[in-house]
Amino acid sequence: MENIEKRNQVWAFIVTGVLALISLIYYNADVYYIYLVVYIWFGFAYGMMLQYGRFCMASASRDLFAAGVPRMAVGILIALVFFSLVSVFLSATNMSTFHPGPIGPHEVVGGIIFGVGMVLAGGCASGSLYKIGEGNGTSILSILGISFGQAIFVDVGGVFNKLLPQSWVETAEATKWIPADKMTSWFDHFLAGYVLIKPQIVLADTKAISSMAGGTMKYFLGNSLINTIIPSLLVLFLIYYFYTRKGFMKKRKKKKASTGFGAEIAGIWNIVTASQRTTFMGILIGITAGIHIFTMKGMQIRFAVNNFGQLLTRMGHTGDVSITGKVFDPGYWYITTQESQFAGWIMEKLGWNVRDNVFFGIMNGLPELWRNPALWMSLGIIFGAMVMALLKKEFKFKLPKGELIVWGLGGGLLMGIGARIALGCNIGAFFIRVAGGDPGGWLFGIGMVLGGYAGVRFFNWWTDRKMAKEMEAF
């Protein structure tokens, strides 16, 4: 046992050392790469925290709906609250890189598809990445499904274009900032003709909130209190009421303790403190996500840019950027778009023209893998989780077999499609947007919960059916 522990510590040291060496190589090549290095180490921090706290929104859905255990769901809500509080000061000091997304029904639809997929795959987008760091082979298939599912989905046209509503086509064709040769796929028309014309809302910037408060208070009132804290407390109360209240009150009655309003508060506090590790990681993740935004904004000010594509252009890597001179550079914690770039890069090397669309050709570019900042953030998550799993003696490579192969690939494919429809995943479309004051994040969250519930019910049906067949054969 002692030898295994020492070996794991050595490997954890090697992984960390390799990332440190890579960082030094980048910095030595060009000081501009420090922008990319920052993404690596924040990804590394996210990976360690996700693995330590077992943070996964698929697990939250499965635990809550299948077993009635609210631990993970509560941890996610705590992370939201703390991230929103940090975001208040970032917005008030103009040190935020957050930008809202178009708000509309597409977020609910995308959330439902994503929610089903994450339960089938056994991990959400962030959960699948950290589980790869633990050696989970099914999660590798899940990320491959997410990656190639997106890259193909945003580029398919042909017969799919015939299914487009005429209003989308007319609106998209009237969009002057998109060249005709980039408007080729079903997704291009969906984006330009339906999604991108929808309003983008940050509550603090609305007239209603601005008229009530100014300065820092409008960000606290609109983005944190109204958009994040109150809804989070409401969800927390609903979880308590439907899943733990009955058992908690039963225990209090046995002890002959009071069951009034104070007992209700104690019951809610009990589910918050039930798993101190998850709660603490929720707090730490929320704070770290805020520091990440602050750091990226500092990098942009330092180099007088608003996108890493500008730095790539300065270094002469013009082939990496889109026709607008950009690459995908969210400025905060984000997953899925960089995975689609990974798949798109492979497809392009195999001869598939993936730049003749809005997604790659105009919005996100297609940088070489080693010059993709957000992709390095995802790799950082994997390696950070690997280091934590090694230190906790939880790393073990598990090769997927049988049904797990289908669930991993199929679930990943659904997550990829859902993420593109909603323009984000459980992190980019839910966690970041809600904490940033975008009410559309809750629309994705509602869809994700509905999809998660449907996925759990499907799994229950499948398991019962399988067991019945096995018993019949026996």
Image (cartoon, rainbow, N blue to C red):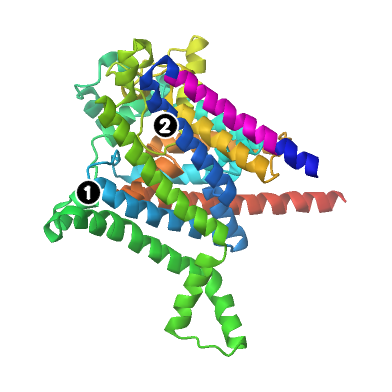
Q: Which residue is the extreme one toward the bottom?
A: 256
* Quarter of the figure with residue 274: bottom right
**Front-lying residue, 470 or 428:** 428
State the residue at coordinates (37%, 11%).
319
Spatial separation of the CA atoms under disc 1 and disc 2: 23 Å
Q: Residue at x 63, y 29 (%)?
A: 14
Residue type marked 1? Ala
- Name above or below for residue 312 compared with residue 18: above
Q: Which residue is mark 2?
A: 38
Question: Residue at the spot x=51%, y=88% of the render?
Answer: 258
Q: Please name the predominant secondary structure of the magenta segment in the image.
A: helix
- 29 vs 245, left or right, is left
Question: Helix, strand or loop at disc 2?
Answer: helix
Q: Which mark is residue 92?
A: 1
Q: Magenta segment, which residues?
A: 9-27
Q: Is residue 340 found inside the magenta-colored segment of the image?
A: no
